[in-house]
Image (cartoon, rainbow, N blue to C red):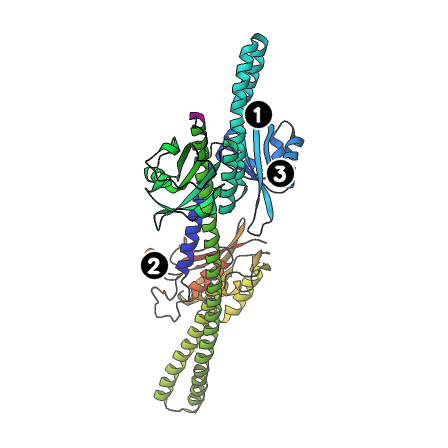
Amino acid sequence: MVEISQLKKKIEELEELQRYNRGLIEASIDPMLTTDNEGVITDVNEQMVNITGHSRKRLIGTPFKEYFTDPEEASEGIKEALAEKMVRDYELTLVSQTGKEIPVSYNATVFTDAGGNVKGVFAVARDMTEYKRLENELKSYTENLEVMVEDRTEELKIQQEKESSYNQIMTVLNASIDLHTMLTDGLNEIVKHLNAPFGIVHLYDAENNVLKPAATHAVKKELLTDQFEVGEGIPGEAALERKTLIVKDIPQNKKYQIKFGFMEADPKTIMSIPIVFHKKLLGTIVIGFMTDVSEDTQQFLQRVVSQFGIAINNAQSYVMVQNMAQELQEYSGQLEKSNQLKDLFTDILRHDLLNPAGLVRGFTDVLMNMETDEKHKELLNKIHNNNEKLIDLIETASKFAKLESTEELEFVRNDIGAIFKNIVDNFEPLAKEKEMAIEFLADGEYFAKANPIIEDVFSNLLSNAIKYSPKGSQVVIDIQDTAPDWRVSVTDFGFGIAEEDKSKLFQRFKRVDKKGIKGTGLGLAIVKRIVDLHGGDVGIENNPEGQGSVFWVTVEKA
């Protein structure tokens, strides 16, 4: 039988991983959001809250287009992303809560569920305020100095190309959660924008402490099986030092024994950058160049690789989540089967125990009718009473076992006042035996979302109140409106419950201060389980009007 604690542990691990992944999204310096297929916002990160000035609660559930100067153009952007699966550098003007207009550039892609069905759009915004400022500055310079304009234009062009390249690479990295697809497409995009002849990504295998090739561009097949220990070769040295390694003048460099099967002509420079996420080594990227590598290119590549680390971690985390979800599903199936076997065992056990107990009851009744000796009758009466207690225990334990394995109930609109009133009528003979008065204060209709099994809750509470109250006392029943619930209370004037014992009352086989009264110790445990299945609460308080207790439960209104 699968332990419930194992299932809880798996759920906690899954929730921790979800919190971890949420932290990655919130760590982004760019505003991010998701929408459904109708363009309604379903999630945002903190940067989106900051740039709009609206709370996360205000943003989620509202149309994406509401926050732009041109709602139709914003809506078209979502439609284009859904149609083309991707939108790059889609410019809009965002309007913050204060009325401030902020130019932004959106890169968006669709995301899917495990079955490949499109569930919505994931968009990353880039604040273009600075870019627009520089653009306006360029326009101003044009009026005064043509040379400055030309210089500035070239500078902006380079910057724009870099930003465009960076955005396109980021879009590709975010386009797929599949690790192999993301690595291959991402590497191809990098070498294209850097005009590099070859590239290779190695992923770190922590168990074997080696770097294994995972994606390549223009690398001969015979080299694809090569792997490096940490510290070995160009990839291994960069991984060991956690620093970028640049090897220049490759044909003349004697330090590294490099096997060149990459291309017809040997590269002049090789740049190896470790892929690290939160100080954790994920792998390396090695890029070959036919020329020296400029400082700008080095910085650009390092910036891209830092995002590569996030993408790899997300992809690996996704695989982990999928595996955990599969394990959780398997555990759920095993648990369901276990519960079914438990129910079957309970039914068999109940049947096999009740049969002999029923025979004992029948033979005892016959013998009691035949017996004339008072001493023998007294012994038979003890057998009869203990046998009845055994039958009650079997029935009650069987009911509790079934309730424990029940996960949900079907609810209908029931008048719980009428249900309880009928129970009171059934208990009137027992109350009269003890010369007790049952005062039913509830007057009217009290419709609740309840399963007929709620009757067992009220029966247990009233039965206990009568059992544990002295002869000649009273029991008060009331139903109060505590929107959105009904609060049903049963007040007795019995012995009361000590504070240290109250926490034990609703546990299995826990009985306190029995006062010689018979019981199985399961009644209040059954009450709590049924109320839990109804989504309500249960509790006990001291009787404010004197000695005794107030037992109460809540049931949702219908």
The quadrant holding residue 508 is: bottom left
Residue 82 lies, in percent from the top left, at: 63, 41
Residue 391, compared with residue 555, is above or below; it is below
Query: Element under label 1?
Result: strand
In-front residue for pair 255/424:
255
Answer whether residue 246 is visible to the viewer in this image: no
Determine the image quadrant of residue 494.
Answer: bottom left
Inter-mark Cα distance, 3 to 1: 19 Å
Number of other residues with Cα within 10 Å of mark 2, as a class: few under 14, some 14 to 19, many 20 or more: few
Q: Is residue 339 left or right of residue 97?
A: left
User: Is the Cβ of the residue at disc 2 closer than 8 Å to that at disc 1?
Assistant: no
Foreground tag (2 vs 1): 1
The Cα atoms of the two marked residues, 2 and 1, are separated by 65 Å
Q: Mark 2–mark 3 contact, CB under 8 Å?
A: no
What residue is at 38 percent from the left and 87 percent from the top? 377
* Image quarter of the C terminus: bottom right
Label 3 belongs to which residue? 81
> Is residue 91 positioned above or below 511 on the image?
above
Q: Earlier in the sequence, mark 2 or mark 3?
A: 3
As shown in the figure, which amino acid type bears the numbered disc 1? Pro
Q: Which residue is mark 2?
A: 501
Task: Report helix, strand or loop for mark 2.
Answer: helix
Camera-nearest residue between 35 and 125: 125
Q: Secondary structure at mark 3?
A: helix
Place of residue 515 in the rendered image (x, y in percent of width and height, measured from the top left): 34, 68
**Residue type (three-letter) at the residue carrying disc 3:** Ala
On the image, the x and y values in percent for residue 274 come to 39, 38
Mark 1 lies on residue: 103
**Can residue 528 be seen in this snapshot?**
yes
Q: Residue farthest to the top?
A: 144
Q: What is the span of residues highlighted in magenta in the rendered image?
A: 290-296
Left or right: 141 as drawn, with respect to 73: left
